[in-house]
Image (cartoon, rainbow, N blue to C red):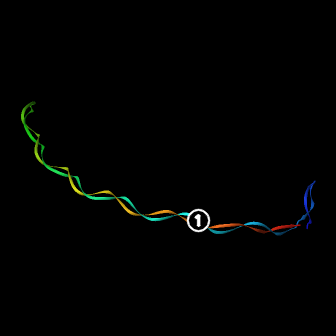
């Protein structure tokens, strides 16, 4: 029920001075109650189930077999032989011989000669000269030669040769073959099937209900 209630507020008014007067008005309080009602509405619901089904496809599978074959190649083979080789080289040797050489030397001999020299002297303040026989000697060089036998040697190059064994090698090509196993494959079509999951769904109608609040006011 609505019950009147008196509420008052102060409102300022401007006069020669500000005074506060009490102004009153009547307001009504509303009383409400809350209750719940069940509300239903149709909805669509999807229901799914999972099953399996066979899925097949054609695939190529490789089938192989071993085939015997022969592979050949040219191989270089080194062959060697021992041969005689003549080698020559120069060897220094000393050769000597006797030769006659004429050797000369200078010798000195004393040779004297008679010479007349004038000798002067003063006698009673008078110079008197006389011839005097004297002998003058001097060293005179002379060349003396003799034949001398001498041994003369010199180094000469003499060729000497010898036979030595030598290995001579050469590469010889030869064809060699060997058995060879290889795989020979081919594609063979085959059908392969696998079980795969399959989801099946359907739409179902159902009622969806819920509690809804409702206010009652007086």
Instruction: Classify the position of the N terminus by image quarter.
Output: bottom right
Q: Which residue is mark 1?
A: 56
Where is residue 160 drawn, in percent x and y? Answer: 20, 53
Q: Is residue 30 left or right of residue 77?
A: right
Given residues 197 and 13, the one toward you in this image is: 197
Q: How many marks?
A: 1
**On the rendered image, what quadrant is the C terminus found in?**
bottom right
73 is higher (above) or lower (below) than 122 = below
Q: Would you say 75 lies left or right of 156 here? A: right
Decide if residue 209 is on the left or right side of residue 168: right
- Image location (x, y in percent) of residue 121: 9, 33
Q: Quadrant of residue 142?
A: top left
Q: Identify the element where label 1 is drawn.
A: strand
In the image, 18: left or right of 61? right
Residue 200 is drawn in which quadrant? bottom right
**Residue 70 position in % (x across, y down):** 39, 62
> Which residue occupies the foreground of this view, 10 or 61?
61
**Residue at the spot 90% in from the left edge and 58% down from the top edge:** 11
Query: Residue 89 placed where, x, y %?
Result: 23, 52
Neighbours of disc 1 within 10 Å: few (<14), some (14-19), many (20+)? few
Q: Quadrant of residue 19?
A: bottom right
Relative to 207, say whether 166 is above or below.
above
Q: Is residue 105 above or below residue 45?
A: above
Depth check: give the residue in front, 133 or 155.
155
């Amino acid at each position: 029920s609505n019950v009147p209630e008196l509420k008052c507020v102060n409102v300022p008014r401007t006069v020669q001075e500000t005074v506060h007067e009490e102004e009153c008005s009547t307001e009504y309080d509303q009383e409400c109650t809350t209750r719940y009602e069940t509300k239903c509405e149709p909805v669509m619901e999807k229901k799914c189930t999972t099953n399996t089904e066979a899925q097949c496809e054609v695939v190529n599978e490789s089938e192989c077999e071993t085939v015997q074959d022969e592979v050949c190649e040219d191989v270089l083979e080194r062959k060697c032989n021992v041969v005689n080789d003549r080698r020559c080289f120069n060897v220094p040797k000393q050769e000597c011989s006797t030769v006659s050489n004429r050797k000369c030397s200078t010798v000195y001999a004393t040779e004297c000669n008679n010479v007349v020299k004038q000798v002067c002297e003063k006698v009673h303040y008078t110079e008197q000269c006389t011839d005097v026989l004297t002998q003058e000697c001097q060293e005179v060089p002379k060349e003396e030669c003799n034949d001398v036998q001498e041994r003369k040697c010199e180094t000469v190059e003499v060729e000497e040769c010898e036979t030595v064994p030598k290995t001579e090698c050469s590469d010889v090509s030869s064809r060699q073959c060997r058995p060879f196993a290889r795989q020979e494959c081919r594609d063979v079509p085959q059908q392969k099937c696998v079980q795969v999951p399959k989801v099946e769904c359907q739409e179902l109608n159902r009622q969806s209900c819920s509690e809804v609040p409702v206010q009652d006011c007086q």
